[in-house]
Amino acid sequence: MLRIMIAFILGGTFAWMTFSRPEEAEDPEGKGPRYRPYLNGWLMSGYMTTLLVGSLIVSGWRGWDEVSWGVITWILVAFLHISLYFILLLLAQPLLRRYLRAGSCALLWLTPNYLYLAMNSSMITPPKWVISLPQGLVERLAAVWLAGALVVLGWKIFSHLRFRRWLLRGGGGGV
């Protein structure tokens, strides 16, 4: 429940910050920054540094125990995930610029920061119930689902082609 509340608070704050800003530049004379950032640049690095220093303080500065190595591992995994996301975003940038506003494209660069802040491992709770399935059942159910999806897709394609042929023969009437 805490995780959902924090995600809603961060999401609401993120939406409010985005849509309450004017689109025009702030200082046309060039005396200051032309556009305000959506997010302070130090937020994610400050969070990770605080987490690392806090884990060292909790462990009593005895050295790199399990807590500190866990935090370092989390930071490295976050760095890897965000780096891969940024590579994909760079590749998709020309297409995104064609269809999205500049502010929306800027927000895509901030998405990993909010995801890691809202969904960090300290907020993960273990599941209350676990349903055990016999081995191989999931694969069989997936095969049945895939077969059904292919049948529906084939039926829709056939229906579309039949309707198209009817329209091209003049069955649609004149407009």
Image (cartoon, helix red, strand yellow):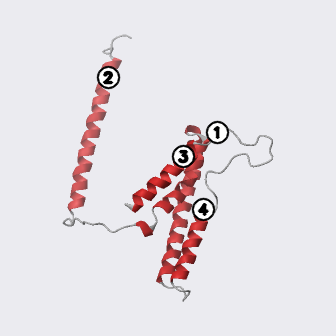
Q: Name the residue under label 4.
A: 43
Q: Nearer the viewer, mark 3 or mark 4?
A: 3
Task: Tell me which label, 1 or 3, sits earlier in the chain.
Answer: 3
Q: Is residue 94 visible to us here?
A: no
Upstream in the sequence, badge 3 or badge 4?
3
Place of residue 90 in the rendered image (x, y in percent of width and height, measured from the top left): 59, 52
Helix, strand or loop under label 2:
helix
Distance (Cα) linking label 4 and label 2 = 58 Å
Q: Earlier in the sequence, mark 1 or mark 2?
A: 1
Q: Where is residue 56 in the image (x, y as percent from the top left)?
A: 55, 81
Rendered residue at 33%/19% (across/down): 167
Q: Circle 1 sits in a helix, a strand or a loop, which is it?
A: loop
Mark 3 = which residue? 16
Residue at 20% over, 65% down? 133
In the image: residue 131, left or right of residue 103: left
Q: Name the residue under label 2.
A: 165
